[in-house]
């Protein structure tokens, strides 16, 4: 089996974690992970995997952007976003569920404590959650730029206060009225 990125390097069987077999490229560090192997490891692991909460080591991910063919079934793989704070995606074969991890992606996922949730990355629920987070980040940036930091902070406080106020509708009507002292 050849590397999906380097093309000329044979993948070697390795363990990415104790008990988790992958086929790894010695040149780019990419790994082919079969879904069944991952699920068996994850089941055996059952949340007992300890991840230190130390400071970020800042893994440099060698994310390759070229389309890839599944080495097991030959189908085109799709890239899935993982988290709005990560600048890479993970490739998945929609037919056999195999997973390609570019160099250092496993380490970055492990550091973010996402390595034991890979099976969820490819679901609509996970992808919608990421889209919602990205949309929120976009609008926060937009409002910050439009209002300025001080006004944006103040309007968010007012928004929370209004939402919790039993007179919300009357308060909004007062604010929106050109002259609230006229009928």
Image (spheres, helix red, strand yellow):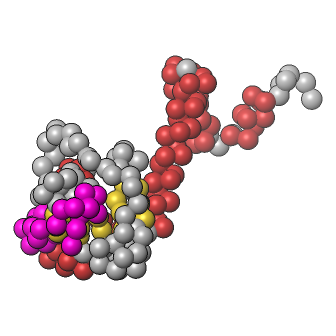
> In percent of the image, x 75 and y 28: which residue is there?
175
- Please tell me whether residue 146 is drawn above or below residue 64 in the rendered image: above
- Please tell me whether residue 157 is drawn above or below residue 163 in the rendered image: above
Corner quadrant of residue 18 = bottom left
Image position, residue 21 (x, y; %)? 13, 72
Image position, residue 81 (x, y; %)? 41, 56
Would residue 45 appear left or right of 161 to someone viewing this image? left
- Most foreground residue, 90 or 119: 90
- Please tell me whether residue 91 is drawn above or below residue 108 in the rendered image: below
> In percent of the image, x 78 and y 30: which residue is there?
176
Outermost residue to the front: 8
> In percent of the image, x 23 and y 42: which residue is there?
60
76 falls in the magenta region = no
Would residue 109 appear left or right of 120 to someone viewing this image? left
Corner quadrant of residue 168 = top right
- Most foreground residue, 26 or 82: 26
- Most foreground residue, 100 or 112: 100
Span of residues in magenta: 1-22
Is residue 76 among the parts visible in the rendering? yes
The quadrant in which the N terminus is found is bottom left
């Amino acid at each position: 089996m050849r590397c999906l990125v380097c093309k000329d390097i044979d993948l070697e069987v390795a363990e990415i974690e104790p008990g988790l077999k992958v086929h790894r490229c010695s040149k780019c560090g990419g790994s082919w992970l079969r879904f069944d192997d991952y699920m068996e490891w994850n089941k055996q692991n059952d949340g007992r995997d300890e991840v230190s909460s130390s400071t970020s080591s800042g893994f440099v991910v060698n994310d390759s952007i070229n389309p890839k063919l599944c080495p097991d079934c030959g189908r085109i793989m799709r890239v899935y976003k993982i988290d709005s704070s990560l600048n890479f995606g993970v490739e998945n074969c929609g037919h056999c569920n195999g997973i390609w991890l570019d160099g250092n992606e496993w380490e970055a996922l492990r550091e973010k404590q996402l390595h034991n949730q890979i099976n969820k990355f490819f679901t609509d629920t996970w992808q919608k959650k990421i889209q919602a987070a990205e949309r929120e980040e976009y609008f926060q940036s937009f409002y910050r730029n439009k209002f300025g930091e001080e006004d944006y902070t103040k309007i968010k406080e007012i928004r929370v206060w209004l939402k919790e106020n039993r007179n919300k509708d009357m308060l909004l009507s007062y604010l929106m009225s050109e002259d609230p002292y006229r009928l």
